[in-house]
Amino acid sequence: MAKTTAAKVRHHYSAGTIIWEIIKYASVILCSFIAILPIVSCVITAAKTPEEYQTTNVMTPPANWLNFSNYLEAFKTANMGTAFRNSLIILVFVLLGSIIIGTQLAYVLNRFKFPGNALIRNMFTFAALLPGIAMQVVVYEIMTNLHLVNTMYGYIIMMCGTDVMSIYIYIQYFENLPVSLDESAFMDGASYFRIFYSILLPLLKPAIVTNLILKGVGVYNEYYCANLYLQDKRALCTVATSLYTFTGPLGSQYNMICAGVIMSLLPALIVFIALQNQIYSGVAAGAVKG
Amino acid sequence: MEISKGWNARKKKQLQVIIAFTIVPLFLLILFTYYPFLEMIRYSFYNMKYIGPRKFVGWRNYVQVFTRPDIIRTLLLSLYYMVGSVVQVALALYLATIFCFKVKGENLWKGFIFFPYLINGIAIGFIFKFFYTRGFVLDTVLQVIGFDLENLPYWLKDQKINNWSLVFTSIWRYMGSNMVLFLGAMMSVDDTLYEAASLDGANKWQTFRHIILPSIKTIVTLNIILSITGSLSAFEPPYVITSGANGTGTFFVVMNDIAHTSQKVGLASAMAVFLLFVIIVAKFVQDALFKYIFRNADTDDESADVARARKKAQKAAARKAKGGA
Amino acid sequence: MKGRKLMSLGLAAVMVLGTLAGCGSGSSSGTADAPADSAGAAEATAEAEGGEAAGETEAADGALTYASVVLGETGTDLTATIKVLNHRTDMLQDSYPGTSWAEYLDAFHETYPGIEVDIEGITDYAQDSLLRLQGGDWGDVMMIPAIDSSQYADYFMPLGSLEEVSSLVRFVANSQYGGVVYGIPSTANAQGVLYNKKVFEQAGITELPKTGEEFIADLKLIKEKTDAIPLYTNYAAGWTMGAWDAYIGGTATGDSAYTNQKLAHTANPFSDPGDGSGAYNIYKVLYDAVAEGLTEDDYTTTDWEGCKGMINRGEIGTMVLGSWAYSQMQAAGDHPEDIGYMSFPITVGGKQYASAGPDYAFAINNSSSDDNKLAALIFVKWMTEKSGFSFNEAGIPISTADNDYPELYAAFEGIDYVSDDPALEGEEDLMSTLNADSELNFNSGGDKKVQAIVEHASNGDMTFDEIMEDWNAKWTDAQELNGVEILY
């Protein structure tokens, strides 16, 4: 890539280069330190016994790094087993739903000229500007009337429905797929549905991965609507809402709270380590094709 | 005749697929976005609670939005977040530029800086309540580097500083994603340009100025403008860390409070409509600004730099070829 | 190319807007809304339909009321599972130092083995319970949230006439509407001040303070002579600040009609009456304590759960909380004997009063099945009469047959309890209307305004009189808006 070649070429180091190197690494290390400090402090605190937490400074390393008792306790208190299961179910269905809905709509918008095409695009663009917070007043009313409150499928349907951004990413990728592709398939007698499912959809994989990541992060971390619509906090808690349990009976027992926080980060961390580059390109997707 | 019949059949098939593929997303969009939006506009003219009688009050709620000092104050609060977002963009730009050059352990550093973006809001609330508590994480670290606890402010209590504390959490959370966004744009620049610049003896600033900056100008400008609009709707940092108490209540937090605690649904709706209006105006200004800034983007400004760099690259390549021979 | 560029910009725009605002498609705030007409109508139809089916059983057994249930006889062979929404999440923890829900339920099952009780604790009860109520799917028993009393009949099962129920249960005035009772208080509290006896001793305080000035002087003594925090505000938890509102009625005026009848009709109720009484002198204690540096160092990071152990260990001198907090403070450490309770330091015409009133009241879903209604009523009556819940939580006895006051009430000897009268007929919803319109929300979640007293006192950017004038102005505006007649 660019950077490797840029640096490889020169081998003698001028004073400027050395200063630059120092500034470069100092900046990077300082920023990294600031970025992980709050998280590291949680890891430290999560390994402390209640006595240790009371008596030592928060940044003093714990006596035993492998003290998992807070994790076990937090896991039980916040009902995190159920929370992880629910979050997984929600993720799977919301992602599936939003992929189907999003790709189909993008396909139609990109491939066909029809009255209303521009209108639909504008509707989605404008929707992104609407302040969602205040509208929940009415959305709650709708959800109540449809008997979707306090059900997992109700929440899933709503989360599929609020998706706006992914459509843009799909349309952008469709523009890169030549129309001649569908044209020749159509001439061969394939239906539009078949063209979409067996020819275009597989080619859309990069855009789908991008959306999976972006939407996945959003859904996994979403707590406001989850708190509002998944009201039975024992049976229907998600990872984000289960954390909220800690504001109640545990008060400021941060050794326990930190354990809960760290556990809630673990799935994200694992996925992040496994898919680091896809995640970066997902986040950068909006800019790359500029 | 045959052709037109085939054409009609094709149109019919198209219509089928159009309807089949648009009906669900449109239904959801209207149900969960547009219908609530129109209802919200209607509510903004009423004095009403969630349940109980509703009274039409005309523009009274809007008058309140403009005259209540506490609401006006929240608009001033968004200035903090605007400054914060500019800092965020600048920092992201700086780090992205650094990562454009060779950095040992690049993936590790990038991972550290980006990871906060993946943390959920509630967890961030806990993390930073802990972080800012007197004598806890931040104070400890500052003491290690020589500050005296006596001289340190109370990060969440002192009203001169607590909004900056909250803005910091927002920068902490989103700076990494901005950085990756910019880096993506920078990486889309042709490799040979960097190579050429380097061969040509261009220093880091020149490389940044003539190669990196042009490639990301659009996305950076857009980010700054959007950050400013986004500042108006800042919600999560105060909501999860201070519950909006102690002078940290932003527009959305106060609106949320008015809607919840006092159940003034009408006033809260009017606030939302007002905010939407501001955002729409900002969007028009932004579009106009964009057209102005990039009016000739494709011909002179940006591509001139690129062309110059490319010429240099060609020259350099020629020199190199000569030297090699 | 150009089009694609714009499209990608649009995408980036959406992304950035989402991330910066922190509330894109995902994390939007929410509120409940079920319009009275539609929800009410639905309930009414359900009631009408259910009513006919239920008609026969009711005719056979007589109407199901609180009085008609005889514990140990009624429904002992009933099999049902009822769901109870409750605010006491701490009691669901095994580590709860008092009697936990599990222990109560074990005792309940000795008499009623067939009735399963499923208790769901809600962390943010005041707000979430409203959502649950309006969502409809909340179970069989809940603690009545802050709704207008005229709405009770839409949601809750009538438990009997006011006359009949009040002969069995104290403090039902707030959970009735139009002479019909809908809720049974879980416990009742007197409003006073928690203190640590040892800290008072160390500070040389021999006589409990009777006025705000004496109290502040005592706090200064504590600050001088001990290491304890003289007054712990519990600012961060929010609701613990809203708890100050409970003192402005009976405690501050000695008048049982003040809270529900007179306050709404009083001109400038937050002005200084000049005799040391009234709401003004309640909140002034808080302002002065903070302004004089007699509270904790950093109010923004106060810790509600932590404060219990702190006062138990003598690290806190006083806290202004209802009597319900007493047993929790005792149980939180090794020094239960050090926890004391006293009346609020305010004197009205030479006498001290203490507001006494109901805590959250149990109410039963009027759309539950008949079996569940019966099981729920049995459970509620058992909680009231047999569980010892109110006593264990240091409450004033609820059942009129029970005169066993926990020992802390000895501190109230010579002090008159004042229990609020219900609102006048036709004005049942007036207070909640004024509360909402003024946004002061007394006794209904107006935590922010009390927090603001702490903030202004700490920053010194607003004098106490200015704050009270501001409240007066808001109250007057709300009164004018609703055309309320000024009578006092």
Image: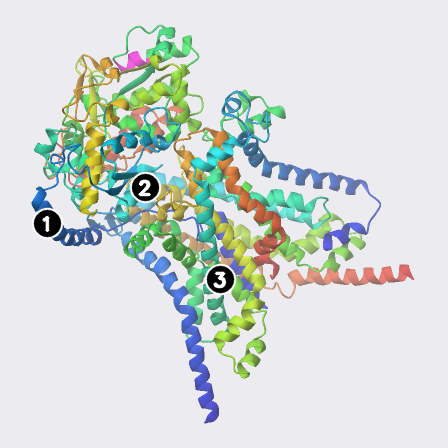
Chain of the residue that carries numbered disc 3 in the rendered image: A
Residue receiving disc 1: C55
Residue receiving disc 3: A99
Residue drawn where x is 42% and y is 16% of the image: C315
Q: In which quarter of the image is residue C347?
A: top left
For the N terminus of chain B, give its image quadrant: bottom left
Q: Is residue B283 visible?
A: yes
Q: Is C212 inside the magenta-drawn segment?
A: yes
Secondary structure under the numbered disc 1 in the rendered image: helix
Chain of the residue that carries numbered disc 1 in the rendered image: C
Residue C300 is situated, as x and y percent measured from the top left of the image, at 43, 28
Residue drawn where x is 33% and y is 56% of the image: B36
Residue range corresponding to the magenta coloring: C211-216
B190 horizontally vs B322: left or right? left
Same subunit: marks 1 and 3: no
Please name the amino acid that badge 1 sits on: Gly
Looking at the image, which is closer to me, C360 or B203? C360
Same subunit: marks 2 and 1: yes
A104 horizontally vs A248: left or right? right
For the C terminus of chain B, give its image quadrant: bottom right
